[in-house]
Image: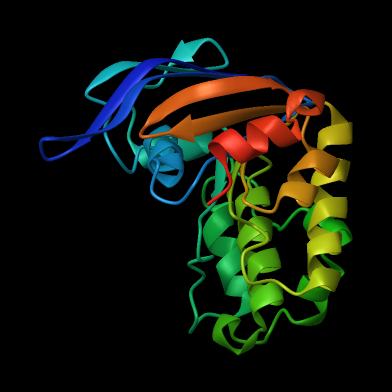
Amino acid sequence: MLKVEKVNVFYGESHILRDVDLQVSAGKVVCLMGRNGVGKTTLLKTLTGLLPARSGKILFRDRDITRDPSFRRARAGIGYAPQGREIFAHLSVQENLLVGLDAARNGAKEIPREVFDLFPVLQQMLKRRGGDLSGGQQQQLAIGRALVSEPELLLLDEPTEGIQPSIILEIETAIRRLREKGNVAILLVEQYLDFAQRLADEFCVMEKGEIVTRGAIKELTPEVVKRHLTV
């Protein structure tokens, strides 16, 4: 579904991502891990077109999207729930979801039933302003907004950050159900080790803008954690 080949990204003249290679298949969850500031969010923003790649290729469903603008990538089937949620605080839950619906490839005008099946609280709070929701509810809204266009690639940046345990479990259940559908590829940036190990099929670890190790999630041993992830 997604193939990243030798991608390099710069901020000005600062070299942030260095020859990044990555693959995510449909029906799989790949967890991108690493200490703070190593380039994980930069990679997700590059995949969505918010940051340009200076070199390398990004292939989505075997099509080169490296130079495509963000709106074209969204309409091609890439959904993104950013770190910090970034919902529209003054819009209602329903209006936030409708903003995401603008990227629907099939021209759909109604919020898919699946979004409310995954996150029932959103249906209960459709008229409530996004800014009035709890942090956990805002995170569910951010993921729901990414899902209304029914993407084939879902990018999730730190979905458990600052979230109460009960809602972490609800988000975990939602991601698991999406994976089980078999037609959605999920790239998950996550620091919460237990959450990642319960959900992911594969992992990649970044250091200083490079992917330094990767493998099946069962290969994420205490030694690997100590070497690459422990602060």
**What x and y, as percent, mark residue 215?**
69, 19
Left or right: residue 60 versus residue 15 is right
Nearest the eye: 114 or 83: 83
Instruction: Tell me the residue at 70%/57% (across/down).
Output: 110
Q: Is residue 205 left or right of residue 202?
A: left
Q: Decide which of 5, 77 is in the foreground and name it.
A: 5
Q: Is residue 42 above or below residue 64?
A: below
Please tell me how many numbered marks the rendered image carries: 0
Q: Residue at x 79, y 46 (%)?
A: 175
Q: Residue at x 66, y 87 (%)?
A: 128
Residue 158: x and y in percent read 59, 55
The answer to whether residue 156 is above or below residue 47 is below
Give 201 or 124, whichever is nearer the viewer: 201
Query: Residue at horizontal 61%, vertical 51%?
Result: 146
Where residue 72 appears, as percent x and y from the top left, is 41, 34
Question: Which corner quadrant of the image does residue 26 belong to?
Answer: top right
Above or below, 122 against 83 in this view is below
| Left or right of 9 on screen, residue 49 | right
Q: Quadrant of the N terminus?
A: top right
Q: Is residue 116 visible?
A: no
Question: Residue most toward the left?
Answer: 13
Where residue 199 appears, as percent x and y from the top left, is 81, 40
Residue 98 visible in the current orientation: yes
Q: Quadrant of residue 116?
A: bottom right
